[in-house]
Amino acid sequence: MKLFTYINDNGNQKLASGYTNSNDLLPLEKIGLAFDNMLSLIEASAENNSLLSEINKAVSEAPPADCIKIANVKLCSPIPNPKQDIICLGINYMEHAEESARYKKEAFGGERPYAVYFSKRACSTVGNGDIIPAYENLVDSLDYEAELAVIVGKKAKNIPENDAQKYIFGYTILNDVSARNLQTRHKQWYFGKSLDGFAPVGPCILTADEIPFPPELSIQSYVNGELRQDSNTNMMIFGISHVISELSQGMTLLPGSIIAMGTPAGVGMGFTPPKFLKPGDTVRCTIERIGDLINSVK
C-alpha cells in the first residue's frame, strides 16, 4: 500500500491511500480515519498493529466513486513537518565514495570503517512538483542525490540488528540536495545540506509489508531527462538493520523519523567537469515500487 499526503479542494492537507500500481487514491476520511497528518497515522499504527491491514482492506473494498485521481490533486511530502532532523548516511555506496574523493579528497577521502552519519535540518520538507531554490548568491555548486529513505514505525531504543525490520513503517524517496561549496567550506555538512527547500521527499510512503527485506530496489536519477544515477539499494555498504540498530544504541528513534540511506554514484560532482544543477533544470529521482519524485530548480 502507498500512503500520500495531498491538498484538498479547501487547501487543507489530507491523507490518502492507494494500491502500489494504481492512479486512484482513497481519502482516509472516506473510511472514517481523520488523522491530522502522517505522523499521527504512524504513531497510531505503532499502537494498533492491525491498522494498516484495516486500511488496506478498506482500499480494496472502496467504491470507485470514493476515489480521486492522483493527477487531480497536489501532492505534498508525505511527512511535511518531521519531528526530528533527518538522519542521513554519507558515502554509503562504494562507487559514490570513489567519485566523492575524486571531487575533493580532503573532504571526502580516507578509509571509513564505520558508517558516516550527519543531520539534515528539515523543520519542513517539500513534495513532488515543488521547487528547489537555487540560492544563486550563496551556492555555486548545487547538487542532487537520489536516496532510499526509511520511515521508522515505532519508538526504537537499543534494538538488536535481527529485530530492526520490526521497527520500519515504510520507505520513500529523498533527494538529498546539497550545496557542495558550503558543504566543503565549513568542513561539516550540516549547513550545505540544510538550506530551506533542500529536502524533497515523496511522492508517497510505500509500507514495509509491500516488499521483501532488505529492499533490493533499482534507484535512478535524471536531470532534464538525462540518466545520471543508476544503481540498486542492495549496493549499500551499511544496511538498514545495521543502521537502525547502531543508532538506537545511543539515541531514541521516534515514530516517523526519517533515515536517508545514502546515494549511489552519478551525482553532479562526480562528473569531469562537474554537472551541477542550475535554474530551469528538472530532477527526477525514481525508486522501483515507490515512484518518481520530480522537482525543478528555480
Image: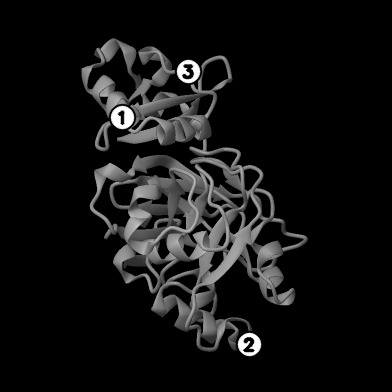
Residues at discs 3 and 2 in contact (Cβ within 8 Å)? no
Residue 167: image location, x then y, percent? 40, 49
> In the image, 65: left or right of 130?
left
Mark 2 — residue? 106
Q: As shown in the figure, which amino acid type bears the numbered disc 1?
A: Ser
Dot 1 lies on which element?
loop
- N-terminal of the pair, mark 1 or mark 3, is 3
User: Residue 220 location in percent, x, y?
Assistant: 36, 60
The span from disc 3 to disc 2 (Cα, nearest Å) is 51 Å
Amino acid at circle 3: Ala
For the residues labelled 1 and 2, the Cα–Cα distance comes to 50 Å
**Sequence-first disc among 3 and 2:** 3
The percent position of residue 288, horizontal first and vertical second, equals: 29, 52
Q: Residue at x 37, y 70 (%)?
A: 236
What SS does tag 2 mark?
helix
Q: Nearer the viewer, mark 1 or mark 2?
A: 1
Q: Which residue is mark 1?
A: 50
Residue drawn at point x = 30 percent, y = 66 percent: 234
Residue at 50% in and 42% down: 255
Left or right of residue 34, residue 208 in this image: left
Query: Is residue 243 at all visible to an observer of this figure?
Result: yes
